[in-house]
Image (cartoon, grey):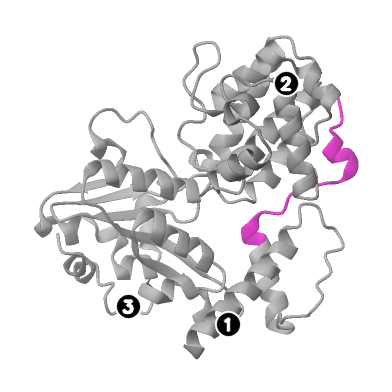
Amino acid sequence: MNLETVLGALQYTASPNYRSGDALGLDPNYGHILRMAQQACDLQGVYTLRGSVYDPSQSDVPVIYVCRADSEQKAREIHRKVWNQNVVPFLLVVSPGWVRLYPGFRYDDHAGDDPRLGALRAIDDFGQVAAALAPIRRDAVDSSAVWKEWGSHVTPESRVDWRLLKNLRSLDDWLSENGLEDRALSHSMIGKFVYLRYLRQRNILSDAKLKEWDISYDEAFGQHARLSTFSELVQRIDEWLNGSVFPLSRTKIQEFGAERLRRVASVFQGGTADGQLPLFDIYDFSLIPIETLSVIYEQFLHATHHPSAKSEGAARGAYYTPVPVVNFMVDRLDSHNPLRPGMRVLDPACGSGAFLVQCYRKLIERRLAFGAREN
């Protein structure tokens, strides 16, 4: 079906709330995410709730991604990637022969052979578009009627971060059941593997970097992982990136053991632990927000090993601030004292640095938008 015809049927074409083309990459809060979606998901446009119309300090919130695909398989892959981004409640995929509407915050990796099973609406006749997609037409989104119709599909339990945390807890429990009594070591090792997946899938820990260090990928964190090679990789990364995320000493790595190391490596590559369903084969850490690392850190920090025990996180008073709350506060700050290059920003309760990161991102997006206007 023709994309412009579908957009017309949904009344998006003339709406100021629908953004497309270069305007996607210039959003002050979501520009970096939308540019990534353009590359990875063939994103064509986004329908937004425009908070800036009522209050210039407020962000515009993406509600519906509009993407293109030339096959059902491609549409399913786009759905998986959008779910990994964890940004938008609904995804509309348009192809020459059909239209699919997916929930952006839910992905069923066991939907069966029929790719339409994961869709909220599967439309094969253009004449059905306006009626079948009435809950996401312009007037329905602007009036909030969409939430009455499909709000039940926007639940936290199915979002990528909640599901990932559940899988990490399952892996932690499996390690405990298989003889690892030191839960802090379990948490550090699991967190380190998540961190390594981020570095690897974002091509920071590239093949060239491993070759420079003379480290074999398979022996470092593949199915044939060796304790000595993994220890060397951890040390190299800590020195290279000037810090230690989920710290692990050589002694603790040795204590973890080679067999457990290989099993955890296998699980992160899509394998299973003791016949379980694969836990991590659906995740794409090149797209999952990097802030999820902070959520994982807080989960382990607040874990208790006995119902009456007090967690380390509670003892420290350490709590993670969700990014939407961070964005709201940074927007308020920016409205009273606009961020500008060279300005100092104080975060007196800095943990993972979420406030400082979002301030820096806002400055970068502002610079990119300024450069685009100059050109």
Q: Which residue is mark 3?
A: 15
Q: Looking at the image, which is closer to me, 132 or 286? A: 286
Q: Looking at the image, which is closer to me, 365 or 136? A: 365
Q: Quadrant of residue 251?
A: top right
Residue name at image x 28 percent, y 80 percent: 14
Give residue 255's position: percent from left, percent from top. 81, 17
Q: Which residue is mark 1?
A: 56
- The amino acid pointed to by label 1 is Pro
Binning the other alpha carbons within 10 Å of mark 2 as few (below 14), some (14 to 19) or many (20 upward) gives many
The magenta stretch spans which residues? 307-325
- The amino acid pointed to by label 2 is Leu
Left or right of 184 in this view: 124: left
Residue 213 is marked as none
Left or right of 347 in this view: 274: left
Give residue 15's position: percent from left, percent from top. 32, 78
The answer to whether 126 is drawn above or below residue 296 in the figure is below
Residue name at image x 38 percent, y 67 percent: 47
The answer to whether 306 is drawn above or below residue 288 in the figure is above
The answer to whether 331 is drawn above or below residue 96 in the figure is below
Residue at the far right in the pictured view: 315
Left or right of 204 in this view: 344: right
Q: Which residue is mark 2?
A: 227
